């Protein structure tokens, strides 16, 4: 984990990061939960490949779990599946994570998994927003240009979408009266 200093902005890993950037922005602009999960799965694939090329195995494996989780969550909200994915992710962490930075992607994927399976609307987006902060740190320390930009922008776009949903929810009772 080398940070962003001296990174080739056109290296294959960085190009995958730029793809994840575009997919991530599209993910968090979605108001529909199902569409958000579809885009999130695509983003996780690009991110996972990027982390593989950057040599961050815990983040790469976490993205594999994230991809499966986002697709599975389209078809089920099973808490048992969510807990199984959390257990798998913790197992991955016990094998490959070293130190706080190694565990950060594991924690982020666990929080995201529980959010995707058990929450919806604003609550789900707030939990995912907490993951964004974790992934921002991971991307900076991994040397991912696109990922660093992505998580910064995701924070802004997700916050904006949360505000829009909150405003719509708040004005809905007034319109019904």
Image: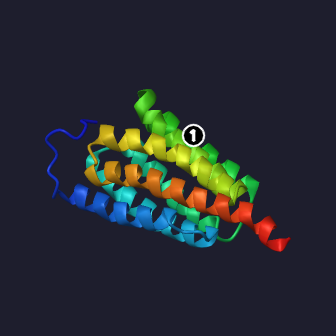
Q: Residue at point 37% right, 54% down?
A: 150
Q: Quadrant of the N terminus?
A: top left
For disc 1, the neighbor class at 10 Å (few under 14, some 14 to 19, many from 20) is some
Q: Position of residue 106 (x, y in %)?
A: 51, 41
Residue 36 position by quadrant: bottom right
Q: Residue at point 42% right, 63% down?
A: 25
Q: Can residue 7 be seen at all in this image of the molecule?
A: yes
Q: Nearer the viewer, residue 10 or 166?
A: 166
- Identify the image's colour scheme: rainbow, by chain, secondary structure or one colour: rainbow
Q: Position of residue 134 (x, y in %)?
A: 47, 40
Q: Quadrant of the C terminus?
A: bottom right
Q: Is residue 73 above or below residue 13?
A: below
**In-image side of 34 versus 1 (left or right):** right
Q: Position of residue 128 (x, y in %)?
A: 56, 51
The image shows a total of numbered marks equal to 1
Q: Can residue 88 be seen at all in this image of the molecule?
A: no
**In-image side of 151 versus 125 (left or right):** left
Q: Residue pushed farthest right?
A: 177
Q: Nearer the viewer, residue 58 or 174?
A: 174
Q: Secondary structure at mark 1?
A: helix
Residue at label 1?
A: 90
Q: Is residue 22 above or below residue 148?
A: below
Q: Residue pushed farthest top?
A: 99
């Amino acid at each position: 984990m080398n940070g962003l200093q001296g990174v080739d902005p056109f290296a294959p890993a960085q190009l995958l990061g730029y793809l994840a950037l575009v997919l991530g922005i599209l993910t968090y602009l979605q108001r529909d939960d199902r569409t958000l999960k579809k885009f999130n799965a695509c983003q996780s694939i690009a991110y996972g490949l990027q982390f593989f090329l950057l040599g961050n195995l815990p983040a790469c494996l976490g993205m594999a779990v994230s991809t499966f989780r986002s697709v599975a969550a389209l078809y089920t909200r099973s808490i048992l599946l969510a807990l199984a994915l959390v257990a798998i992710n913790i197992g991955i962490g016990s094998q490959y994570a070293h130190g706080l930075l190694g565990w950060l992607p594991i924690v982020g994927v666990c929080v995201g998994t529980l959010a995707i399976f058990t929450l919806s609307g604003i609550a789900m987006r707030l939990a995912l927003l907490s993951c964004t902060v974790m992934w921002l740190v991971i991307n900076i320390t991994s040397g991912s240009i696109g990922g660093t930009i992505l998580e910064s922008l995701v924070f802004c776009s997700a916050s904006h979408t949360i505000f829009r949903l909150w405003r719509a929810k708040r004005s809905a009772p007034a319109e019904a009266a």
